[in-house]
Image: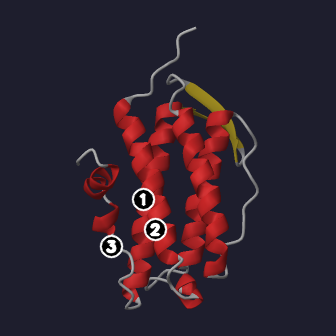
Amino acid sequence: MTTQTPDPTLDRLLRHMAWANARLIARLAELDDAALGLTAPGSEWSVAMILGHIVGGAGGYVARLEGTARPAASMPPAAVAELEAIAAACAGLDARLRAAASVPDGFVEYDYGSGKKRRRRSTILGQSIHHATEHRAQIAGALAANGRDAIDLDALDLWSYGDAEGLGA
């Protein structure tokens, strides 16, 4: 039996997402509990809520790709002490997304709200990457809007990942 080789570009993008998510959570763990409650002006979503949404979204994408039930929503972290468990959960989901990329592209059907949805596997995988990137930026913005320049998005980009990976950008 021949094993499908993952697309090297998609694989690298998924590895980058996992690395950036882990770095984000590690940086948040260095802050105080109050930082988790910060919001950007005009938004009711706190840093903790956005982080929970990143991880919850990953769980939803995994469920769609694996054909399993979507996991129950989890509560946003109330304290930085909870971030170690969130980091482990996120890493596990990111690894499952990467594994799902080894399955050939095709359509999956899943329950979504009031009915069924049908999407390409590649669309779900691509959305998982964009979703995490968008919300990492929202977290950085919420912190910066409150005078906490704790997350340097340039340190989480693909160039920095290439340097960290040791393979060059």
Disc 3 marks which residue?
152
First in sequence: mark 2 or mark 3?
Answer: 2
Residue 113 drawn at (x, y percent): 70, 49
Residue 4 drawn at (x, y percent): 49, 19
Disc 2 marks which residue?
24
Disc 1 marks which residue?
20
Q: Residue at x 61, y 49 (%)?
A: 93
Screen quadrant of the N terminus: top right
First in sequence: mark 1 or mark 3?
Answer: 1
Q: CA distance from mark 2 to mark 3?
A: 9 Å
Confirm whether residue 45 shows in the render: no
* Left or right of 168 on screen, residue 150: right
* Left or right of 161 on screen, residue 116: right
Tell me how the rendering is colored: secondary structure
Number of the label disc, if any, that sits on residue 150: none
Label 3 crowd bin: few (<14), some (14–19), many (20+), radius 10 Å: few
Amino acid type at mark 3: Asp
Label 2 crowd bin: few (<14), some (14–19), many (20+), radius 10 Å: many
- Position of residue 133 relative to residue 101, above or below, is below
Q: Residue at x 44, y 66 (%)?
A: 136
- Position of residue 66 relative to residue 133, above or below, is above
- Position of residue 38 relative to residue 8, above or below, is below
Q: CA distance from mark 2 to mark 1?
A: 6 Å
Q: Residue at x 47, y 46 (%)?
A: 127
Contact check, label 2 and label 1, Cβ < 8 Å: yes
Q: Nearer the viewer, residue 148 or 162?
A: 162
Element at badge 3?
loop
Amino acid type at mark 2: Leu
Residue 92 drawn at (x, y percent): 62, 50
Element at badge 2?
helix
Choose top left, top right, bottom left or bottom right for residue 79.
bottom right
* Left or right of 18 on screen, residue 72: right
